[in-house]
Amino acid sequence: MILVADSGSTKTSWCVIDSSENYNYIETNGLNPCLQSEEVILNELQTNLFPKITCEISRIFYYGTGVTSEKQPVMTEILKKVFPQAITVEAYSDLLGSARSVCGNNAGIACILGTGSNSCLFDGKNIIDAVNCGGYILGDEGSGAVLGRNLLNAFLKRDLSEKIHDDLVKNHNLSYGYIVEKVYKTPMANTWMASFTKYLNENQNEPCIRKIITESFEAFFVKNVEKYADYKNHKVHFIGSIAYHFKPILEEIAKRRQITTGNIIQAPITELANYHKNIQ
């Protein structure tokens, strides 16, 4: 049986392909070996994943955020501890998973816009170039974390309309002290900041909110997509909740920058499951 995973910082989608080629989906909390300890990840898998799997897993293909070259063996070993009977255990970056799911066997630029952001130039088989994402402190332009961060910055710097400012105070209990506590003194601050994207989406027609969204996506294109040679000659594909829910604005900005968009999907798990079922 095959177990395929697509993991972000907010949630992890799993697909079990059984002997009859049925697809069974499971969802757990997000995993990120760059931000979480091995113990935390192992506990999450043992508590929220393993008990829900009813067949013996022989092959595992994991794609996730934070799976750098340094963290790849770490994630592999954690999975082996949970599934010691598995013959094949492979861990890859979420970027490769995204490229395989939206580009298929074709060349193109694959982008992630979820809690974090990333991009790569894909030749149909391999990633041949990738701009460093930098994480939510040094990069992640256009991501949920940065959209939320920019909203909080605008709140603190008095750049929001009185209506939006007062609404955030009244209905979301925002204050300087609360924001500092959540951002600097609690774990997974990126996920908390990304939670404000729902608010941004609901209020996207407010000029001050529209400005935050537009500037974030403009920055993503400038600092990521437009760094690749001949980017205007490639289709630019997107995966992630941010790309999916803000699709009209994203396409509008891409068109203005003479960038051709391709597939825009919320999650790649089914496409990745198909990929591994078909190549075995």
Image: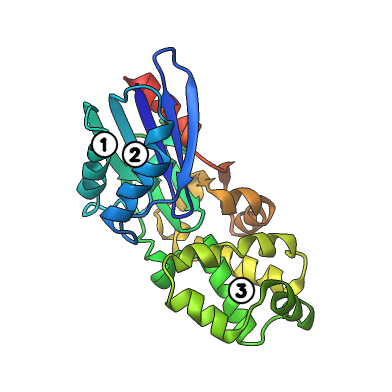
First in sequence: mark 2 vs mark 3: 2
Distance in Å between CA atoms under marks 2 and 1: 6 Å
Quick check: 58 above or below 161? above
Q: Amino acid at mark 1?
A: Glu
Label 2–label 1 contact, CB within 8 A:
yes
Q: Which mark is residue 90?
A: 1
- The spot of residue 144 in percent (x, y) is 54, 61
Residue beneath the point at 53% across and 48% down: 240
Q: Who's the residue at 52% across and 46% down the image?
A: 239
The quarter of the rendered structure image containing the C terminus is: top left
- Where residue 19 is drawn, which disc sits there? none
The amino acid type found where label 2 is placed reads: Tyr
The one of 111 and 66 positioned closer to us in this rendering = 66
Q: Looking at the image, is mark 2 or mark 1 earlier in the sequence?
A: 2
Q: Position of residue 110 (x, y in %)?
A: 45, 46
Which sits in the foreground, 152 or 213?
Answer: 152
Which residue is most to the top? Answer: 20
Tell me the SS state at disc 3: helix
Q: CA distance from mark 2 to mark 3?
A: 33 Å
CA neighbours of label 1 inside 10 A, class few (<14), some (14 to 19), many (20+): some
Picture quadrant of residue 207: bottom right
Above or below, 18 against 72 in this view is above
Q: Quadrant of residue 211?
A: bottom right
* Marker disc for residue 62: 2
The numbered mark at residue 151 is 3
Q: Is residue 142 above or below residue 100?
A: below
Indicate the amino acid at tag 3: Leu
Q: Nearer the viewer, residue 132 or 43?
A: 43
Residue 167 percent location from the top left of the image: 75, 75
